[in-house]
Amino acid sequence: MQAEATIIEIREETPTVKSFLFDLGETPFKYLPGQWVDFYIETKSGLQIGGFSITSSPTVEGTIELAVKRLPYGIPAQYLHDTARVGDSFHIDGGSGKFYYEESKGGPLLLIAGGIGITPIISIARYVAAKKLDIKMDILYSASTPSEFAFKTSIEEIVASSHNFDCRFTTTQHSEEPWHGYNGRINAELLQQYTTRNEDPLIYLCGPQPMITDIEKTLLDLGIEEKRINAERWW
């Protein structure tokens, strides 16, 4: 599905991540929570295409939100961070991808994110909360430092909205920033704790390739069926 999307708000989520809220006008735009869009940018170097996960919930009509991490490579991401302004319009195409959740899949849910891998995860969490689904949902989210937790306040608000929701934030690198939460990578101890809280959880996992590989292996070692694990890799 295609649409023209106009920026109506830009927010700095972390020192390296910005979120962009787009007005879709009258165009009906269908997607599932967890999917991504192709994003087309005309630059001096020609047409550039970036694939970005949708961070909003499809329950919200007329707008769509994307979050983009600034990287040393990738012209579309650099353009959005350095050049894009409120009022700019872009062509988008989607939603795409097999990494998605819908109500018929049931629960309980265990959502696991590393770094910018939070983008499709927050879309799923927002969808579950907005639909007031009667399922249990846990979120495990690791970032390098406390300031790199994108959507932390939104996640905390989602968790506070239901007694069925819980989350755990953990940092993976030493930092001088104040932090009183969990330190260390998402390991077997944490995974065992959260996979035994709720019987037979449906797991959504998104992050860097090495993290995905390690966590998938640990989940299988813990007895989680492969068909219950949905993974989206950032290469």
Image (tube, helix red, strand yellow):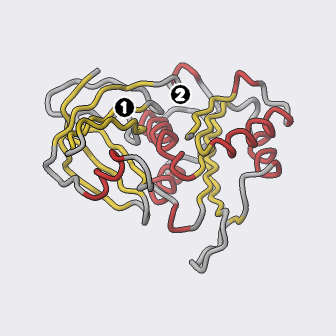
Given residues 137 and 65, the one toward you in this image is 65
Query: Looking at the image, is 130 positioned above or below residue 151?
Result: above
Q: Is residue 125 left or right of residue 135?
A: left
Residue drawn at 21 percent across, 28 percent down: 3
Real-space CA distance between mark 1 and mark 2, rounded to the nearest whole angstrom: 12 Å
| x and y, in percent, of residue 43 in the image | 21, 44
Q: Position of residue 140 (x, y in %)?
A: 64, 49
In the rendered structure, the answer to whether residue 126 lies left or right of residue 233 reads: left
Q: Are marks 1 and 2 in contact (CB under 8 Å)?
A: no
Residue 195's disc is none
When asked about the image quadrant of residue 15, the answer is: bottom left
Tell me which label, 1 or 2, sits earlier in the chain: 1
Left or right placement of residue 19 versus residue 235 in this view: left
Q: Neighbour class for label 1 at 10 Å: few (<14), some, many (≥20)?
A: many
Identify the disc placed on residue 37.
1
Who's the residue at 76% across and 45% down the image? 191
- The residue lying at 47 percent from left, 55 percent from top is 157
Image quadrant where one finds the N terminus: top left
Q: Is residue 13 left or right of residue 142?
A: left
Q: Is residue 195 above or below residue 174?
A: above
Q: What secondary structure is marked by label 1? A: strand
Image x and y of residue 156, in percent: 51, 56
Q: Residue 158 or 4: which is nearer the viewer?
A: 4
Image quarter hosting the C terminus:
top right
Amino acid at the residue labelled 2 = Phe
- Asked which secondary structure carries label 2, the reply is loop
Residue at image mark 2: 99
Q: Please provide percent x and percent y for residue 193.
A: 79, 48
